[in-house]
Image (cartoon, rainbow, N blue to C red):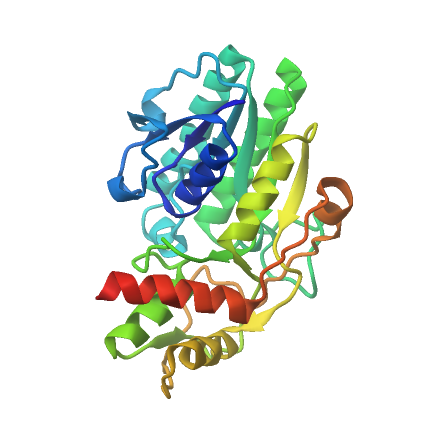
Amino acid sequence: MRAAVTGGAGFIGSNLVDALVARGDDVVVVDDLSFGKREFLNPAAEFVERDIRDGVELDGVETVFHLAAQTDVQTSVREPATDASANVIGTIMVAEAARRAGARIVFTSTGGAIYGECDGPAPEGSSRRPLSPYGIAKLCAEEYLAGWNRIHGSSHVVCRLANVYGPRQDSSLEGGVVAIFLERLARGEETIVFGDGLQTRDFVFVGDVVAALLAAAGHDGGVFNVGTGEETTVLGLHRACAEVAGREAEPRLEPARLGDVRRSVLDVSLAAAELGFRAQTGLAEGLARTWAWTVEQVR
């Protein structure tokens, strides 16, 4: 198929583009390189350097994987209007471009930030109580796409991602806690945990997320959680990162931050039933693969 990937020079987007190219798809990458990196661009893909808020043309495209976004929770707390501009206005512009092209959107949303505090693995029908402007904006973008489905008869698909990690993740962003830990461990620098470290997250490897997005592209609409269904404490994650790095390091604890939820884990049974998707990469394996990539970058 002919596919477009917004944010295709970024962490998840570039991994997705590689998978699309590898299976023989014709791919267009739309990215303004504000977060993405030119070196992550696949040379076999067409590249359009553009901010999605300025509008895009998707003539001939059948599926749009919409990943371009402002993804940092703390940035959204400090600059909510900037976050809303990227994540809401940007999504509307992509939705309109897809409508003109007759293309389906696979939208990457967020699980943890939309559901808010969880008392167990959250299914797609859980109450949506975001605690950050980032989560609010992503929820708003979801509602716009659902509205476009009703108004225009489209069948956009939403994938609510857990905490994604893996090669090419940016350690400068809050969501990249694995990247932050591994890079600092590689450099022999101090690591920091905000809060008591007992907050939990569902960590899912980027290769598994790519597989879920490809599966979602063939589905006729819907909202799907994409994660492992397993929760890990941040301190437990740090221990696992230190182990794979061969270090004996303890993090410094700092006060918890506004917008960070205490518990976040996704119920992934719907994706298993309807998309045939289950995460295949265990945390230890995923961290080992990410560590190998990190060491190469630090050298």
The answer to whether residue 21 is above or below residue 243 is: above
Closer-to-camera residue (137/98): 98
Query: Which residue, as the protein is rendered here, is positioned at the far right?
Result: 273
Which quadrant: the C terminus? bottom left
The spot of residue 225 in percent (x, y) is 64, 48
Q: Is residue 90 visible?
A: yes
Query: Which residue, as the protein is rendered here, is positioned at the far bottom?
Result: 248
Residue 15, quarter of the rendered image? top left
Left/right placement of residue 60 relative to residue 77 reads right
Closer-to-camera residue (82/168): 168
The answer to whether residue 248 is above or below residue 195 is: below
The structure residue drawn at horizontal position 49% and vertical position 40%, both measured from the top left corner, is 19
The structure residue drawn at horizontal position 52% and vertical position 40%, both measured from the top left corner, is 108
Q: Is residue 110 visible?
A: no
Left/right placement of residue 84 relative to residue 130 reads left
The answer to whether residue 3 is above or below residue 257 is: above
Residue 248, quarter of the rendered image? bottom left
The spot of residue 132 in percent (x, y) is 47, 52
The structure residue drawn at horizontal position 67% and vertical position 20%, both measured from the top left corner, is 150
The spot of residue 110 in percent (x, y) is 54, 48
Which quadrant: the N terminus? top right
The structure residue drawn at horizontal position 61% and vertical position 27%, both measured from the top left corner, is 156
The spot of residue 186 in percent (x, y) is 29, 74
Total numbered labels placed on residues in the image: 0
Left/right placement of residue 183 relative to residue 117 reads left
